Image (spheres, grey):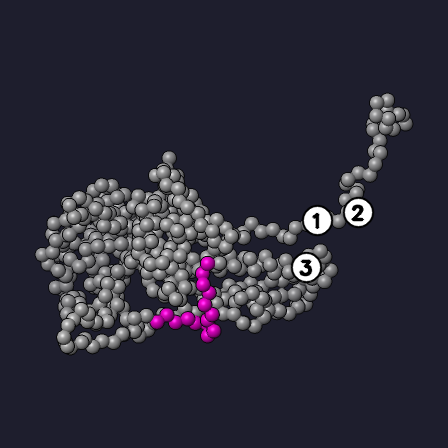
Amino acid sequence: MSIDAQTGAQTQNGQNAQSSLGTAAARNLATTTKTVPQMQGITSRWLLRMLPWVQVSGGAYRVNRRLTYTVGDGRVTFVQTGSDVRVIPDELRELALLREFEDADVLSALAQQFEQREFRPGEILVEAGQPADQVFLVAHGKVTRLGSGKYGEQVVLGVLADGDHFGEHSLAAADGEWDFTVKATTRATVLVLPRSAFQTLADQHAALREHVRRYHCDDHGPTNQRGEADILLSSGHVGEPALPQTFVDYELSPREYELSVAQTVLRVHSRVADLYNQPMDQMEQQLRLTIEALRERQEHELINNAEFGLLNNADYGQRIQTHSGPPTPDDLDELLSRRRNSRLFLAHPRAIAAFGRECSSRGIYPDSVEVQGHMVPSWRGVPIFPCNKIPITEQGTSSIIVMRTGEDSQGVVGLHQTGIPDEYQPSLSVRFMGIDEKAVISYLVSAYYSAAVLVPDALGVLENVEISRHA
């Protein structure tokens, strides 16, 4: 052993000797400060926070509406084999003329009469003033309806995309003319049925011919602009005229929403639950993360579920297409114009970024609003909340949802049931299932929920929103 001349520390074999307790050894006696288990999958879940939740005591929620005469304005579905596209025969019932036609053989024969056509961007499909003697089904792509303004200028009447159709009334009405022009915005694949082919098939099949006759003769009575049975009123009259007599008719088979469920079985070994609870309770942390996952699944289902999900329950009349691809202020303005008292937008974070780019390119800087202590971007005073549960397609397109909420506003409401057995959170229960022969404790964790759209215009969707940055 020797003394280092500069430091004074003792050295042995030419190396400095440790003169105090090292930190690695000291940690053996120290108390470590820990965080609770972290989870990357937790999001803001704005939809769950902003929906008004309605107590559904009986497990089902019935939405009663005024009687509405359905006119067959849905989307048509196609099947594709290579480059060949054909319409599914049963989907032809989405056309107003064929709404209640049941003969599958005739529908199959009719589907075979459609001719597939391809259109380039800018190419005209139909022109105003020309004979309207064909029905068009848009299988793929986007087309724009154009009309004339007050002073003869060309104006955009609307955008049609995959599954949309136009011209179906020309099948049964002779000598009509197009009162608008349709031009392809992108490359478009369209199926076309001439009236002559339809008439030939009707001449061969008495069932189709009789159905067309009944369609023309059927009179549901007066309706309002929403298709509801009209309430007859009189106003502005003088004297003592006979007042109209009326009543408010209801739907005979109103829709009922049953509560859905998301469940899992949480399993914890009794030895872990007994011995390893300091400084954090193991069961509490296991349960906390399990509930977070259930709530994430709940929001996903409220957006995407085939039965009650918002994307699947938006009325086709409330679905619009973007004018140019990316989400623009014009697109969001059109969404807002289709309903009163819109409360919120929901969009994927990448769709919000795409909207921000469009605003910046126009020199527009949207305001932010404060919601529950958070600053949230908005448009026209309506907050735009991020929601990563809204899907993005392989082609880089998404959707933007806008809604009016609450029963008092005839909007969108969330459905749940509180007061259930073993309730841990509102409409979420944690039920002890027992201990098995391996000393593993099991708990059934269940969340019950659904959503309802009270009237069609409470919910709108901007579809085919391009979110990728153009090269």
Q: Earlier in the sequence, mark 2 or mark 3?
A: 2
Provide the secondary structure element on which disc 2 rests. Answer: loop
Q: Position of residue 100 (x, y in %)?
A: 24, 67
Q: Earlier in the sequence, mark 3 or mark 1?
A: 1
Provide the secondary structure element on which disc 1 rests. Answer: loop
Task: Compute the Cα span from label 2 to label 3.
Answer: 22 Å
The image's mark for residue 29 is 2
Task: Compute the Cα span from label 1 to label 2.
Answer: 13 Å
Tell me whether the residue at label 1 lies in contact with that at label 2, contact meaning CB atoms closer than 8 angstroms: no
Q: Position of residue 40 (x, y in %)?
A: 56, 49
The image's mark for residue 33 is 1
Kindly identify the amino acid type of the residue bearing the numbered disc 2: Leu
Q: Position of residue 417 (x, y in %)?
A: 49, 70
Q: Position of residue 334 (x, y in %)?
A: 31, 51
The image's mark for residue 257 is none
- On screen, residue 379 above or below 59: above
Kindly identify the amino acid type of the residue bearing the numbered disc 1: Thr
Q: Residue 54 colored magenta?
A: yes
Instruction: Point out the image quarter for the N terminus.
Output: top right
- Left of 440 or right of it: where is 200? left
When asked about the image quadrant of residue 255, the answer is: bottom left
Residue at position x 18%, y 76% from top?
Answer: 243
Asked if residue 169 shows in the view, the reply is yes
Asked if residue 118 shows in the view, the reply is no
Q: Nearer the viewer, residue 418 or 159?
A: 418
Task: Decide: few, some or many residues near mark 2? Use Cα within 10 Å; few <14, some 14-19, many ≥20.
Answer: few
Instruction: Point out the image quarter for the C terminus.
Output: top left
Q: Nearer the viewer, residue 157 or 111?
A: 157
- Left of 259 or right of it: where is 457? left
Give, as a single range, the part of the protein colored magenta: 50-64
- On screen, residue 339 above or below 5: below
Residue at position x 53%, y 66% from top?
Answer: 426
